[in-house]
Amino acid sequence: MRRIGTQYRFFRPFAAPPKAPADRVEVLRRAFKATLEDPEFLALAKKTRMVIDHVPAAEVAAQVNRVLSTSPAVKGKLRNIIGN
């Protein structure tokens, strides 16, 4: 039995459109990573009390895929509980 609820570490995920070219997605990923490792950016973030907690794309994708793979029976039970 798998726990449905999970505590996500990502709060503001960025996503590319469906079927975005893989090379462009990779450029975006590298750009985010470079920004989040940039000392000047990190200093400004600290100064403005911005919380930086980078979650790699692979981890976000794994979380999303786990939720999307929930069985239809369980999804139905959740809809009944939530009221939709």
Image (cartoon, grey):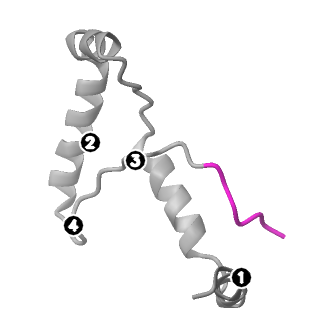
For image coordinates 53% across by 57% down, the residue present is: 62
Ranked by sequence position, the earlier of labels 3 and 4 is: 4
Q: Do the residues labelled 2 and 1 touch (CB within 8 Å)?
A: no
Q: Mark 1 points at which residue?
A: 81
Q: Are marks 2 and 3 in contact (CB under 8 Å)?
A: yes
The stretch of residues the image draws in magenta is 1-7
Q: In the rendered view, does 66 fall on the left or right side of 14?
A: right
Q: Nearer the viewer, mark 1 or mark 4?
A: 1
Looking at this view, is 23 or 75 the one in front? 75
Ranked by sequence position, the earlier of labels 1 and 4 is: 4
How crowded pointer 2 is (Cα within 10 Å; few <14, some 14-19, many 20+) is rated as some
What is the residue that sits farthest to the right in this orientation?
1
* Residue 19 lies in the magenta-colored region: no
Type of the residue with mark 4: Pro
Q: Name the residue under label 4.
A: 17
Q: Position of residue 46 (x, y in %)?
A: 34, 12
Q: Nearer the viewer, mark 1 or mark 3?
A: 1
Question: Residue 37 sits in which quadrant?
Answer: top left
The answer for how far apart the CA atoms under marks 2 and 3 are is: 8 Å
Type of the residue with mark 1: Ile
Q: Mark 3 points at which residue?
A: 57
Ranked by sequence position, the earlier of labels 2 and 3 is: 2
Type of the residue with mark 3: Ala
Secondary structure found at label 4: loop
Q: Position of residue 36 (x, y in %)?
A: 30, 25
